[in-house]
Image (cartoon, helix red, strand yellow):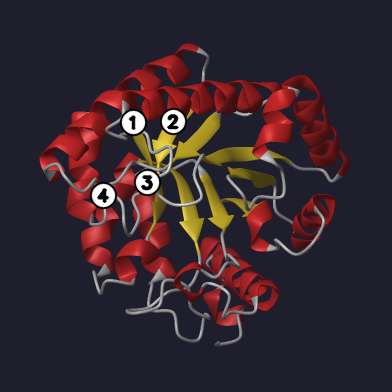
Amino acid sequence: MKLAACDYTFPKLPWEQTLRIARDLGVEAMDVALFAGRSHLDIQEVFSDLPHAAHRVLEALRGNGLRIADVFGQPGTVFEENAVNHPEASVRAAAAEFFYRLLEFALRCNGSHISLLPGVHFAGESEADSFQRSVEELAWRVEAAAKVGVTLSVEPHIGSIAPTPQAAARLLDMTPGLTATLDYTHFTYQGIPDSEIEPLMARASHFHARGACKGKLQASMKENTIDFDGVLRAMQRANYNGFVVLEYCWVDWMDLNRVDNLSETVILRDLLRGLDTGSLASIQKV
């Protein structure tokens, strides 16, 4: 199992310090976020001088014995803003420019994986039209990324056009080459059982791990209902070879700021390591 952390787990710390925490946690790699208005790395500053920004990231990662696992791009402060499937052509053009810049940044950071959001249903048109536009927009992005050796994935999430495992599978079926950044928590929150989520593992190239339960998108490991033993078994059956990212977040949205991120990250890390080595009995019951 390849463990990674993400820089947005600790938004109140300086960016370089999040890397030092990841190093001390003993993970191999880092997910780097470019989120409009809320990531450590400011999108405008990064895009205004990509060579300089990438050099800073590479040097900081190397200095902490890390590599880049994923570049996660979100060009809007809300899901609709600059969404890949926005009805207005001018907005889609801006989203396309964001994608190309994100792709260049990933390449300059020696990255080979980027994640996007899949788009949303826009009021005033049918869900089918919003969905089809996402398929069309994501299809050319998959091809553009593949040409330079980068895997493109989307994270099915609450509030997107793919809020359920069935909708996510349909999006992947209709967009050849597209993969999933799979996060069970968006489905667990809705009360969807692991058994309905598990088939998506065969389509995943990246995995976000944290605790969740029905009604809580992010929960402590005491409250967690996701069967991570079953998750790792599903990974084995699917020959999953991507990163498993410790993805506790701290943000107001969906009350994701109600958990002790550091403690829960350590508990989850130890649980996953114990399951991975078959030594679950040595892990203190949470």
* Lower position in the chain sequence, tag 4 or tag 1: 4
Number of callouts:
4
Badge 4 local density, few (<14 within 10 Å), some, or many (20+)? many
Q: Mark 3 or mark 2: which is in front?
A: 3
Q: Residue 174: image x %, image y %? A: 19, 31
CB-based contact (under 8 Å), mark 2 and mark 1: yes
Q: Which residue is mark 1?
A: 178
Q: Which residue is mark 4?
A: 162
- Residue nearer the viewer, 69 or 190: 190
Using the numbered discs, state the Cα–Cα distance from disc 4 to disc 1 in whole angstroms: 13 Å
Q: Mark 4 or mark 2: which is in front?
A: 4
Q: Which residue is mark 3?
A: 80
Label 1 secondary element: loop
Using the numbered discs, state the Cα–Cα distance from disc 3 to disc 2 in whole angstroms: 20 Å
Q: In the rendered view of the protein, which quadrant contains the C terminus?
A: bottom right
Q: Which residue is mark 2?
A: 152
- Residue nearer the viewer, 103 or 232: 103
Q: Mark 3 or mark 1: which is in front?
A: 3
Badge 3 local density, few (<14 within 10 Å), some, or many (20+)? some
Q: Mark 4 or mark 1: which is in front?
A: 4
Q: Quadrant of residue 233?
A: bottom left
Residue kind at label 1, given as amino acid type: Leu
Residue kind at label 3, given as amino acid type: Glu
Q: Which mark is residue 24?
A: none
- Residue nearer the viewer, 54 or 172: 54
Using the numbered discs, state the Cα–Cα distance from disc 2 to disc 1 in whole angstroms: 6 Å
* Lower position in the chain sequence, tag 2 or tag 1: 2
Badge 2 local density, few (<14 within 10 Å), some, or many (20+)? many
* Lower position in the chain sequence, tag 3 or tag 2: 3
Q: Is residue 58 above or below residue 204?
A: above
